[in-house]
Image: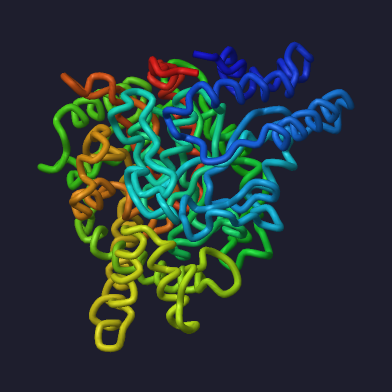
């Protein structure tokens, strides 16, 4: 298979040095990556590639590098965007027939900031329709396949992003996380991914699913590469009403994540000395697969060998996160997706009798089954007579879940650790007829979004037996705006292990 040139470099820092020294050009990197993407079409990770747009960005990066101080920190670095970030030039479809031909007149803030930093976009990545799903099987473009085992799902909703990074098609990618949609596919594809604190990354230009839950973030092989990508993505945006202005007293601006990461890093044989890692007993119940439990326990042992102290903690309302999340998220989805009425933009049915019929038919044709299911659920819980019983009650539970986290973070531990997903990747089609089983795959990630906390997933091993080539991810959860410490903890682990360097046979 065609090999992407950037895979010859250990990380973004090494690639940046090679670009600065002109040992490789942005155009060469882009051309080799485009060839690799074409050779890996069976993965279905990309929904759109435009070589002309990509090479124009690469040439601009080469020109900036030639000028020296004009180049941004990611000049020439090949990435790609999840297809829920609107982009000029490329279509933005949210993997839905509803937006099959939509081209945005502007860039999302995340896209704009990474472009300003010099990154070269290779295209748009597959995902679950409107980011609703846990397996990337809900895409109107068909499912993405897991590079480690193409019979398996890559996770969702950012499955295309995780698969593209794992297969070496890109060195990094953007994703979004509403209930685990960065961390869960990162776990199932053996890559690293972080969901930052709610409000640190602008949601402007990110197609909304659940507005109080959605948060953008990067996916890459290592924690160090996550720092490189997340740092320019962060910062206050006046166009986003949910954007945070300050973080722990510091202005929310590019540079904050890198500064916090550098401050949290420690050298020596015990870089995590004194770090208290809370392990929730609720994360290790009957629903956790034994092979995942063993890999997680081994990873916790490695963290202890690096100086950390393991502390048992309790998050007693973990199980309530599933019903609370699916009430709140579907309610917000019902509201957000009401804008797709076939009047201003989006799919319009060919035949209808009046405006109401046009909207109804267009939505029935344009939205997939899972999106329709969530819209109907959300409309129900917001309806008269059920709003207090369901939606308000879910919001009360949400506050109690956040209090559970704050009751242990800081007082009992510095970081919480546990599995990102209760199993390794399952086979394509295995859970398609059982949406409840699919929802349960997010049991360890949903509460983080409800509380608005930062969390990441990193690879720590593989399953056993017939799952021996399917990765396992460890989730680290921190207190608000503590991305630097999470990334430094992950980096210390990755400097002592090589799980993040393992590559699947289906490698570009």
- Residue found at the far right of this picture: 67
- Residue found at the far bottom of this picture: 384
Image coordinates of residue 369 in percent, x first then y, are 32, 59
Position of residue 24 relative to residue 187, above or below, is above
Q: Is residue 64 left or right of residue 312?
A: right
Image coordinates of residue 431 in percent, x first then y, are 21, 45
Residue depicted at x 45% and y 38%? 160
Q: Is residue 287 left or right of residue 311?
A: left
Q: How many marks?
A: 0
Q: Is residue 443 left or right of residue 50?
A: left
- Residue found at the far left of this picture: 286
Image coordinates of residue 125 in percent, x first then y, are 52, 40
Residue 338 visible somewhere in the drawing: yes
Q: How is the image coloured?
A: rainbow
Residue depicted at x 63% and y 19%? 32
Foreground pick, 189 / 271: 189
Foreground pick, 184 / 354: 354
Residue depicted at x 44% and y 50%? 177
Q: Quadrant of residue 35?
A: top right
Position of residue 20 relative to residue 117, above or below, is above
Q: Is residue 215 left or right of residue 504?
A: right
Image coordinates of residue 102 in percent, x first then y, are 60, 57
Position of residue 499 relative to residue 488, above or below, is above
Residue 496 visible somewhere in the drawing: no
Position of residue 284 relative to residue 35, above or below, is below
Residue depicted at x 40% and y 61%? 367
């Amino acid at each position: 298979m065609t090999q992407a040139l950037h895979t010859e470099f250990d990380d973004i820092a090494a690639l940046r040095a090679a670009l600065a020294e002109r040992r490789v050009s942005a155009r060469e990197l882009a051309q080799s990556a485009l060839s690799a993407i074409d050779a890996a079409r069976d993965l279905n990770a990309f929904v759109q590639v435009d070589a002309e747009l990509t090479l124009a960005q690469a040439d601009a990066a080469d020109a900036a590098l030639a000028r020296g101080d004009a180049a941004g920190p990611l000049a020439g670095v090949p990435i790609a965007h999840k297809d829920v970030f609107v982009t000029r030039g490329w279509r933005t479809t949210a993997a839905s027939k509803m937006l099959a031909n939509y081209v945005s007149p502007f860039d999302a803030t995340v896209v704009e900031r990474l472009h300003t930093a010099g990154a070269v976009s290779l295209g748009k990545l597959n995902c679950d329709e409107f980011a609703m799903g846990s397996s990337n099987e809900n895409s109107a473009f068909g499912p993405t396949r897991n590079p480690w085992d193409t019979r398996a799902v890559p996770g969702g909703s950012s499955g295309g992003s995780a698969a593209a990074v794992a297969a070496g098609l890109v060195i990094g990618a953007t994703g979004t996380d509403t209930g685990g949609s960065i961390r869960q596919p990162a776990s199932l594809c053996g890559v690293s991914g972080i969901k930052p604190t709610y409000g640190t990354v602008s949601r402007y230009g990110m197609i909304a699913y659940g507005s109080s839950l959605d948060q953008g973030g990067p996916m890459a092989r290592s924690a160090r590469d996550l720092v490189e990508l997340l740092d320019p993505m962060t910062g206050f945006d006046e166009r986003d009403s949910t954007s945070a202005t300050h973080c722990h007293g510091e202005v929310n601006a590019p540079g904050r994540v890198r500064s916090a990461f550098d401050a949290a890093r420690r050298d020596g044989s015990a870089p995590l000395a004194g770090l208290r890692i809370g392990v929730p007993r609720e994360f290790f119940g009957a629903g956790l697969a034994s092979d995942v439990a063993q890999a997680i326990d081994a990873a916790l042992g490695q963290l202890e060998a690096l100086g950390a102290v393991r502390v048992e903690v309790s998050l007693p309302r973990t199980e309530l996160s599933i019903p609370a999340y699916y009430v709140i998220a579907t309610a917000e989805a019902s509201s957000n997706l009401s804008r797709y009425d076939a009047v201003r933009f989006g799919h319009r049915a060919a035949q209808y009798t009046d405006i109401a019929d046009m909207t109804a038919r267009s939505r029935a044709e344009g939205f997939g089954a899972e999106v329709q299911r969530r819209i109907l659920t959300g409309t129900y819980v917001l309806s008269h007579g059920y709003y207090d019983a369901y939606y308000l009650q879910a919001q009360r539970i949400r506050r109690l879940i956040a209090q559970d986290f704050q009751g242990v973070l800081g007082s009992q531990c510095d970081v919480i650790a546990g599995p990102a997903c209760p199993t390794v990747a399952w086979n394509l089609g295995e859970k398609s007829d059982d949406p409840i089983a699919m929802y349960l795959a997010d049991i360890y990630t949903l509460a983080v979004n409800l509380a608005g906390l930062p969390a990441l997933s990193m690879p720590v091993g593989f399953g056993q037996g017939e799952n021996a080539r399917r990765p396992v991810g460890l989730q680290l959860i921190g207190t608000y705006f503590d991305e630097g410490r999470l990334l430094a903890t992950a980096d210390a682990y990755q400097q002592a292990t090589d799980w993040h360097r393992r590559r699947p046979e289906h490698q570009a």
